[in-house]
Image: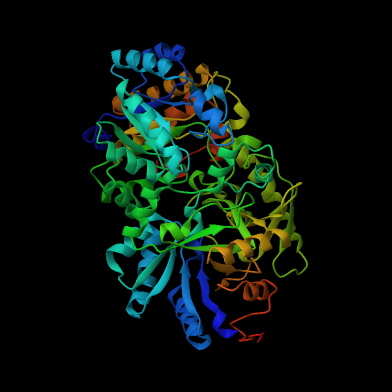
């Protein structure tokens, strides 16, 4: 069973304030070595300030002189990696996939009323020229969310490996954090370049409504995939040779990846935690 | 004052337009550039409004035929005003790009000056056409750093339209490091709570962000709330909704002077002159002509003050007094660029 876990997925995809400090990255790399996992390091969209933070971390990772996958959610970060970090392997993050994830309306896409051409285009993303350009930047893996409307992209034909997030997809994100603003004076709230004390680690909100469960964590709103939808995603992943990025607890700072649906189900139930090295042996 | 004069250069106001009827009044009031959408019937027949061709879901926002656009372009060119067409869906599939390329050939044929694009596949396809048409990168590309600007410069875009969620300091840093391109910034109307380029919702069900969501709040450690925490977090939701109201054009209200309220970067124009920004964007293809005209006039009047040699402080005060809504301006929530008013 141990061998079916592949990566420790660490870092933040959504907020440059949450780019980890170097000691934390070192610690997680060491944890990978201890547990036999590979590190997959996630990065958010960034300003020039965030780029400077990432440069320090990339220098460390590249200096390890082993191939390490870095999830990029900003073409500036992709550009940076191409120019100066030969050991880093870019993975196109899910923020770069612009497919609709609006839970108020995506269920309607799967009804018989949906126009077939419209539905097909809503299940697809990108074009040949786009994917060719990504290859020039050495992108071999592309992340997706588990979309309600399904996914109809021939990743194999494109020579790319898909990677799917379970069980939380993101709906929308931005530079304004609801929870960091809570602790500020009114005039200082809702700023784009605001410092924070990581209040998003302490508080979260659920948006009420007649749709999928929506959770606001910091600057981002996520939709939770109920068991049936998660199973659909797992089946799609198995059929398409996708990496499954499993993060059963939204507030954990790590996720785990696997290519095995049974292992994924185990992780999603919370049966695996590399930190405590509890590894459940299964047949 | 000296600084602004020494770096004085042309800064265009780019104005939305959705019909030929709007052209004369907008041209007469100083529009420097027009941008518009077009949604041909065959696109709607195939995809319906479930898949917008240019981010707009109602017919009022776009022109409906090449003929109408042709007349608009010809008329605009009489005034030497260029016309840009938005093809700014977050992404297009291969079959959609095939359709759009044929459309773009027609747009080029009628003299459209440029396209506003965010999808890289479409951008590369237009480049392969090897026609003399400008490509402006849509704000949906979410350029927040100089490396991203460099990435798109390599793809030969002529202009980057910077996103809404960016500060003047960040704009200055990008422009300083990555030249050889034009930059356009948002100046009036229609802000967003989330970053447009990372917002995967559709306005088909109404804007996600301005829906008045009810929340249940939790602590991640599930310990009891202190009174201070309860006050802070629940009070914050009211502030968040208030900010959302400002972002959403202050509920489409007007000032007592009859000027439109809503997201505003007028105080930042002085900085944009100094930085060397090429164009200021007025938002709202589907807005009324009255709103477009008044927005245009406000931006023109502020530019007039700069041209007269006003200092940054005086220009900023002029912008605030012009609308005469100090309670809205002082909140800071109506500002596109709050850092514009912290350095007067």
Q: Is residue B246 left or right of residue B70?
A: right
Residue A235, percent across and down? 63, 64
Q: Nearer the viewer, residue B26 or B19?
A: B19
- Quadrant position of residue B316: top left
Name the quadrant of the N terminus of chain A. Answer: bottom right
Q: Residue A277, relative to residue A149: is it above or below? A: below
Number of numbered callouts drawn: 0
Residue A153, percent across and down? 50, 53
Q: Nearer the viewer, residue B46 or A46?
A: B46
Q: Residue at x 62, y 42 (%)?
A: B209
- Quadrant position of residue A22: bottom left
Q: Is residue A124 left or right of residue B223?
A: left
Q: Residue A141, relative to residue B287: is it above or below? A: below
Q: Nearer the viewer, residue B294 or A129?
A: A129
Q: Residue B100, relative to residue B300: is it above or below? A: below
Residue B197, percent across and down? 48, 46
Instruction: Judge whether residue A94 can be spotted in this image.
Output: yes
Name the quadrant of the C terminus of chain A. Answer: bottom right
Instruction: Judge whether residue B29 can be spotted in this image.
Output: no
Residue A274, percent across and down? 59, 82
Q: Residue at x 47, y 38 (%)?
A: B89
Q: Residue A122, relative to residue B322: is it above or below? A: below
Q: Residue at x 43, y 57 (%)?
A: A157
Q: Residue at x 43, y 43 (%)?
A: B94
């Amino acid at each position: 069973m141990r061998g079916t876990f592949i990566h420790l997925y660490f870092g933040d995809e959504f907020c440059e304030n949450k780019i980890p400090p170097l000691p934390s990255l070192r610690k997680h790399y060491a944890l990978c070595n201890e547990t036999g996992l590979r590190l997959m390091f996630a990065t958010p969209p960034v300003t020039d300030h965030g780029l400077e933070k990432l440069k320090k971390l990339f220098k460390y990772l590249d200096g390890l002189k082993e191939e390490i996958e870095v999830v990029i959610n900003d073409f500036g970060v992709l550009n940076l990696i191409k120019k100066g970090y030969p050991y880093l392997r870019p993975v196109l993050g899910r923020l770069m996939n612009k497919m609709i994830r609006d839970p108020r309306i995506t269920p309607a896409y799967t009804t018989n009323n949906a126009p077939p051409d419209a539905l097909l285009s809503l299940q697809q993303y990108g074009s040949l020229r786009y994917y060719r350009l990504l290859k020039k930047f050495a992108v071999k893996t592309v992340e997706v969310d588990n979309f309600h409307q399904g996914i109809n992209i021939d990743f194999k034909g494109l020579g790319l490996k898909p990677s799917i997030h379970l069980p939380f997809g993101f709906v929308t994100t931005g530079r304004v954090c609801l929870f960091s603003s809570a602790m500020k004076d009114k005039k200082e709230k809702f700023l784009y370049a605001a410092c924070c004390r990581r209040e998003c680690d302490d508080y979260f909100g659920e948006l009420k409504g007649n749709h999928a469960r929506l959770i606001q964590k910091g600057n981002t709103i996520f939709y939770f995939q109920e068991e049936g939808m998660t199973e659909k995603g797992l089946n799609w992943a198995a059929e398409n040779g996708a990496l499954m990025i499993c993060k059963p607890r939204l507030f954990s700072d790590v996720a785990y990846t696997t290519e095995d649906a049974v292992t994924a189900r185990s992780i999603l139930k919370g049966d695996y935690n590399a930190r405590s090295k509890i590894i459940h042996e299964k047949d | 004052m000296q600084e602004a004069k020494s770096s004085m250069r042309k800064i265009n106001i780019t104005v939305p337009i959705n019909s030929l009827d709007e052209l004369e009044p907008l041209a007469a009031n100083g529009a420097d550039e027009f941008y518009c959408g077009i949604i041909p019937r065959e696109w709607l027949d195939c995809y319906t409004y479930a898949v917008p061709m240019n981010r707009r879901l109602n017919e009022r926002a776009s022109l409906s035929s090449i003929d109408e656009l042709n007349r608009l372009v010809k008329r605009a060119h009489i005034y030497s005003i260029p016309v840009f067409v938005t093809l700014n869906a977050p992404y297009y599939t291969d079959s959609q790009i095939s359709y759009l390329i044929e459309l773009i050939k027609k747009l080029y044929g009628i003299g459209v000056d440029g396209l506003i694009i965010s999808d890289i596949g479409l951008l590369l396809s237009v480049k392969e056409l090897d026609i003399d048409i400008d490509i402006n990168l849509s704000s949906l590309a979410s350029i927040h750093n100089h490396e991203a600007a460099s990435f798109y410069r390599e793809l030969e875009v002529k202009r980057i339209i910077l996103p809404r969620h960016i500060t003047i300091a960040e704009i200055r840093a990008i422009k300083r490091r990555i030249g050889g391109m034009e930059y356009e910034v948002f100046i009036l109307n229609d802000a967003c709570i989330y970053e447009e380029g990372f917002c995967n919702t559709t306005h088909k069900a109404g804007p996600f962000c301005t829906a008045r969501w009810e929340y249940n709040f939790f602590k991640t450690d599930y310990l009891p709330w202190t009174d201070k925490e309860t006050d802070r977090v629940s009070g914050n939701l009211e502030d968040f909704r208030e900010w959302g109201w400002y972002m959403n054009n202050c509920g489409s209200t007007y000032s007592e002077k009859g000027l439109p309220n809503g997201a505003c970067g007028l105080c930042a124009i002085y900085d944009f002159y100094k930085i060397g920004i090429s164009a200021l964007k007025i938002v709202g293809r589907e807005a009324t002509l009255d709103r477009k005209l008044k927005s245009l006039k406000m931006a023109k009047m502020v530019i007039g003050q700069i041209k007269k040699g006003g200092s940054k402080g005086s220009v900023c005060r002029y912008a605030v007094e012009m609308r005469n809504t100090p309670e809205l301006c002082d909140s800071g929530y109506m500002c596109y660029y709050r850092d514009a008013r912290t350095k007067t």
